Image (cartoon, helix red, strand yellow):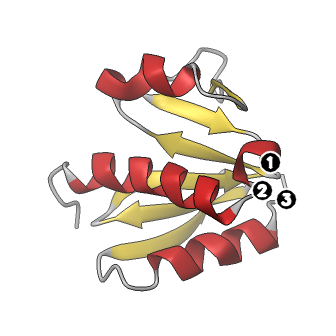
Amino acid sequence: MAFDQGLAQRVRELLADNPYATEKKMFGGLGFMISGNMCVGIMGEGMVVRVGPPCYAHALALPHTQEFNFTGRPMKGWVMVDAHGLAEDEDLAQWLERGEQFASALLPKH
């Protein structure tokens, strides 16, 4: 699956000041990690955001979201945000911040 290069570049720019941010091609998309923990991933024209179980229901109630179902069953704590929910820079930044907050709270992976 190809991923939206423009969206990936927008995410790179927002993460440019985070010294713990890295990226990795995975599952036909592009994953962005914080200290080795996945925070968001670009898949097609949308973005998977790791919000964590405590924020999952709230995130799913927001516009342009759906369950992330990559393996045939929904992954709790992960939501898929479609391109419409990421079109504005402010919206993209808010989704990225949600993913960063969750990933930053986890123990670093090395």
Tell me if I can see residue 33 in this picture: yes
Mark 1–mark 3 contact, CB under 8 Å? no
- Residue 21's quadrant in the figure? bottom left
- Which residue position holds label 3? 2
Point out residue 107 in the picture as x, y percentages from the top left corner: 14, 53
Q: Quick check: 68 left or right of 101? A: right
Point 72% across, 59% down: residue: 88
Horizontal relation, residue 3 to residue 97: left or right: right
Secondary structure under tag 1 reads helix
Q: Is residue 106 above or below residue 56?
A: below
The residue beneath circle 1 is 83
Q: How many marks?
A: 3
For the point 57% across and 17% down, which residue is it? 74
Q: Tell which of 95 and 77 is nearer to you.
A: 95
Q: Residues within 10 Å of mark 2 (few under 14, many from 20)?
A: few
Tell me whether the residue at label 2 lies in contact with that at label 1, contact meaning CB atoms closer than 8 angstroms: yes
Earlier sequence position, callout 2 versus callout 3 = 3
Mark in front: 1 vs 3: 1
Separation (CA) of disc 1 from disc 3: 14 Å
Instruction: Judge by depth and name the residue closer to the eye, 97 or 50.
Output: 97
Which residue shows up at 42% across the image and 49% down it?
99
Residue 87's label in the rendered image is 2
Q: Nearer the viewer, residue 88 or 74?
A: 88
Question: Secondary structure under badge 3?
Answer: loop
Residue for point 57% across, 19% down? 61
Q: Which image quadrant for residue 28?
A: bottom right
